[in-house]
Amino acid sequence: MPPVGCPAVMVGAMRRGWRPTVRVRRTDARFYDAFRRFHYLGSGPAVAARVLGAWVDGEPAGVLVTSRPVLNGRWRAVAWPGVFDGPDKRVNAQRVNALLRTIARVVIDPRYRGLGLAAQLVRAYLRRPETIYTEALAAMGQASPFFERGGMTRLAHTTTQPERRLAAELQGLRVEPRRLLVVRVPRADHAVARWASSSGGRRGHGTTPAERARAAGRALVCPPVAYAATAPSQTLADRPGGRADREHRNQGDSDRAHGQANDGRPARGMAQ
């Protein structure tokens, strides 16, 4: 049994000579249920495309879940110019569904944090991605940049016109955006509602004025960090139903490691 505890306990055990054996392999959506409570949203993607699990010395320790992406994402024009932002919206949508997957969740049991498991899960997925393009949005990317450590490229944040208008309106109302994170400000309701409507009614805005206010506050104060990766063609052998896919299902994508070391190289060719 691993010396489970807080991250400090785990790191301390490693300094005393404990070298965990980490195994990463493919599993199913039911595996995520045990980790759902550790994620700040408390829910998972509507449909999981792929699930990778991480075990430390045989104990379930973390999970990565991919899903189909939302149709619109302004960061994609930065990551892959001309691929998903062409003049024909129908073609763009077809390309998004066919060529892109989103890493929607990476959740680590608090007892096993500090071992680099999140980055190992990302590296394991990028070695055999479902599609040539992979993206991720991290609400806590500023504080925990494990996507970069896992081999993805961080994209420069660009504000949208609705966000700039909302910031200007809040300034005129003398409302600090950070206030919206903790309390609804009724005089800002109209500006927030207009921002939510102009932003395309994206999931996550909420349905009540208080929920929309918090979403607006997050958009201005702590916007999510976008990450992208482009797979070399040789890593795409894992096609649904193909030989590599069957082998992957039967054998799992093993990632044996000591501490944060990895026995394989992460997929490269990242978006610039």
Image (tube, grey):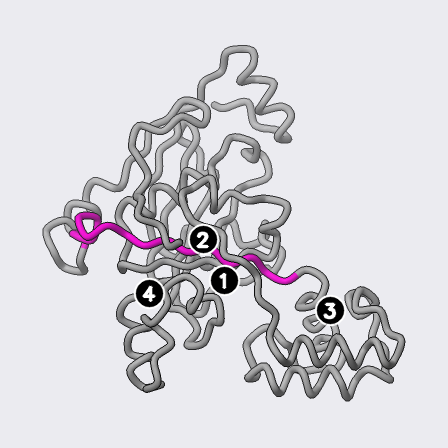
Query: Badge 4, how many Cα within 10 Å: few under 14, some, many 20+?
Result: many
Residue 20 appears left or right of 167: left
Dividing the picture into quarters, in which one does residue 199 lie? Answer: bottom right
- Give the SS element for disc 3: helix
Mark 2, other Cα within 10 Å: few <14 / some 14–19 / many ≥20: many
Tell whether 98 sits left or right of 181.
left
Q: Secondary structure at mark 1?
A: loop
Instruction: Say which amino acid is labelled 2.
Output: Tyr
Residue on which the image places disc 1: 44
**Magenta-drawn segment:** 223-238
Asked if marks 1 and 2 touch (Cβ < 8 Å), the reply is yes
Residue 33 visible in this rendered orientation of the protein = no
Three-letter code for the amino acid on which mark 1 is drawn: Gly
Which of disc 4 and disc 2 is earlier in sequence?
2
Marking on residue 32: 2
* Residue 112 coordinates in the image, percent (x, y): 54, 33
**Residue type, label 3:** Gly
First in sequence: mark 1 or mark 4?
A: 1
Q: Nearer the viewer, residue 223 or 186?
A: 223
The residue indicated by pointer 3 is 217
C-alpha distance separating marks 4 and 3: 29 Å
- Amino acid under label 4? Leu
Question: Which is more N-terminal, label 3 or label 4?
Answer: 4
Could you classify mark 3 by the number of other residues whose Cα lies within 10 Å: few (under 14), some (14-19), or many (20 or more)? many
Which residue is at the front of the view, 243 or 72? Answer: 72
Check if residue 227 falls in the magenta segment.
Answer: yes
Of the two numbered discs 3 and 2 on the same chain, state the one appearing first in sequence.
2
Q: Measured from the top left, where is residue 62 in percent x and y?
A: 47, 42
First in sequence: mark 3 vs mark 1: 1
The residue at which mark 4 appears reads as 100
